[in-house]
């Protein structure tokens, strides 16, 4: 599979799972109607989908220049930390505006989501790699 196809497939499948979790969680956390929080989950997911594509392209470019190939725990940890950290900086203001709450409240809810998605991202990426194989960037030159 081409790197672009792989990134798009990985991101889309990841976000389908994200929408299924985030919508109901935000509805419960902020006592908002399901229709509002589902739509917010779609917006957040769309932002995350774009970030996922950009972040993975940059990460794989960096990864391809590394002497040690493969994706060990440390590299997966760096991937998850970089992805989720950047996404937090982007999503917190959006959540605060949408939910009509403070940045602090949105950040606190995002921390809960971050804890879930950090584990989800690492597990999902591992499973995705098992099903679809490692990308060329993790294998080295052909």
Image (spheres, grey):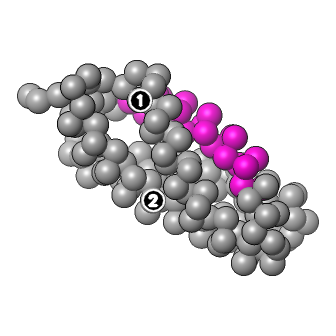
| SS class, disc 2 | helix
In the rendered image, the vertical position of residue 109 relative to residue 103, given as above or below: above
In the rendered image, the vertical position of residue 23 relative to residue 126, given as above or below: below
Residue 51: give x, y in percent of width and height.
45, 59
Q: Nearer the viewer, residue 55 or 5?
A: 55
Q: In this view, does 84 lie to the left or right of 98?
A: left
In the rendered image, the vertical position of residue 49 relative to residue 117, given as above or below: below
Which circle's residue, 1 or 2, is located before the other in the chain? 2
Residue that label 2 marks: 51
How far is disc 1 from disc 2 in space, using C-alphas?
19 Å
Residue 39: give x, y in percent of width and height.
68, 71
Residue 89: give x, y in percent of width and height.
58, 61
Q: Residue at x 65, y 72 (%)?
A: 94
Residue depth check, mark 1 versus mark 2: number of the one nearer the observer? 1
Q: What secondary structure is the magenta-colored segment mainly?
A: helix
Asked if the stretch drawn in magenta spans residue 121, the answer is: yes
> Quadrant of residue 22 in the image?
bottom right
């Amino acid at each position: 599979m081409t790197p672009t196809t792989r990134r798009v497939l990985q991101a889309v499948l990841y976000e389908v799972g994200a929408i299924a979790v985030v919508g109901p969680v935000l509805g419960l956390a902020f006592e908002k109607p399901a229709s509002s929080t589902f739509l917010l989950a779609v917006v957040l997911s769309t932002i995350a989908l774009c970030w996922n594509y950009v972040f993975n392209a940059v990460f794989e470019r960096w990864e391809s220049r590394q002497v040690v190939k493969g994706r060990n725990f440390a590299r997966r940890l760096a991937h998850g930390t970089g992805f989720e950290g950047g996404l937090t900086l982007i999503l917190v203001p959006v959540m605060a505006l949408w939910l009509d709450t403070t940045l602090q409240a949105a950040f606190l809810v995002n921390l809960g989501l971050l804890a879930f998605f950090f584990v989800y991202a690492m597990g999902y990426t591992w499973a995705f790699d098992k099903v679809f194989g490692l990308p060329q960037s993790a294998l080295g030159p052909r």
